[in-house]
Amino acid sequence: MKTLQLPLLALLAALAAPLPLAAQDTTEAPAEGETVVADPPSEDGLSMGVEVGGGDPQAGDTYVAARFEAWEQRCVKTETGADPCQLYQLLKDADGNSVAEFSVFSLPEGTQGPAVAGANFIAPLETLLTEGMRLSVDGSKTRAYPFTVCTGVGCVARIGFTAEEIGMFKKGAKATMAIVPFVAPDQQVTLDVSLKGFTAGFDAVTAANKAADEAAKAAAAEAPANP
């Protein structure tokens, strides 16, 4: 199988529209912790705009809690005040075109099974699903992962990582992901994932998720029993 050379990356990105909202956005991202809320249109369908950065995230809103070099710590606001998070990176080709999304999150302490962390890889539509996604870190042995489902925003591979594999991410410099386009099944799209900031980012996500789990358990214990 040949390694895909540009400009087929751009072709795949074009065929994949629409990508997830974060991948489609070409404007400057909100500042850390900032949220942008869309205003309801008036009767004539015209937007009057809203002030940016003036409000705090509300329950259910996703916001950027911190940035760790190549990664963003994205969290979901909860009513407990302890918000679950994931480590996120938007993957782009050499021309700066958004192609895929990759997010990593810690699993609760005591989770049964070899995985200590999970991840979602969102590939464009028109990806050849039977080939799955292939991943290696700093040239290590490649592992293949199947796609689970496709929606309007893309095709998702749900991944489990062992403690050893997370350790490779923390020590590594670059991961490489590869997918095969449906329109060119004899070729391969490769995407680089920078691991700069991964250690600090994953540790922050792990701490946030541990606090969120504890807050959720406390809230459940305090809730009145159903009659």
Image (cartoon, rainbow, N blue to C red):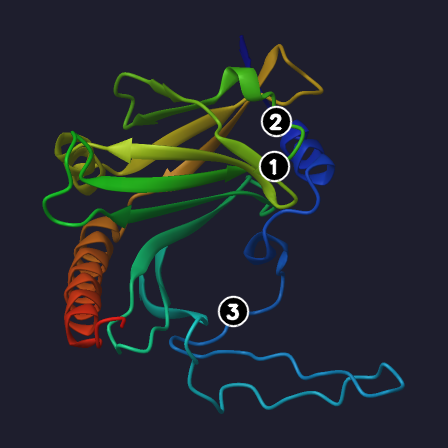
* Side of 103 relative to 218 (left or right): right
Q: Is residue 136 above or below residue 110?
A: above
Element class at badge 2: loop
Which label lies toward us, 3 or 1?
Answer: 1
Whole-number angstrom distance, CA of label 3 to CA of label 1: 21 Å
Q: Is residue 160 above or below residue 67?
A: above
**Mark positioned earlier in the residue sequence (2 or 3):** 3
Sort mark 2 into few (<14), some (14-19) or many (20+) by Cα contacts within 10 Å: many
Residue drawn at point x = 29 percent, y = 41 percent:
118
* Side of 158 relative to 94 (left or right): left
Q: Is residue 183 visible?
A: yes
Q: Amino acid at mark 3?
A: Ala
Element class at badge 1: loop
Whole-number angstrom distance, CA of label 2 to CA of label 1: 6 Å
Q: Please give the residue where the numbered disc 1 appears in the rendered image.
A: 124
Q: Amino acid at mark 1?
A: Pro
Residue 119 x %, y %: 34, 41
Q: Please give the residue where the numbered disc 3 appears in the rendered image.
A: 29
Q: Amino acid at mark 2?
A: Thr
Residue 52: which quarter of the image?
Answer: bottom right
Q: Is residue 70 visible?
A: no
122 or 186, nearer to the observer:
122
Whole-number angstrom distance, CA of label 2 to CA of label 3: 27 Å
Residue 221: which quarter of the image?
Answer: bottom left
Badge 3 vs badge 1, beta-carbon distance below 8 Å: no
Q: Please give the residue where the numbered disc 2 appears in the rendered image.
A: 127
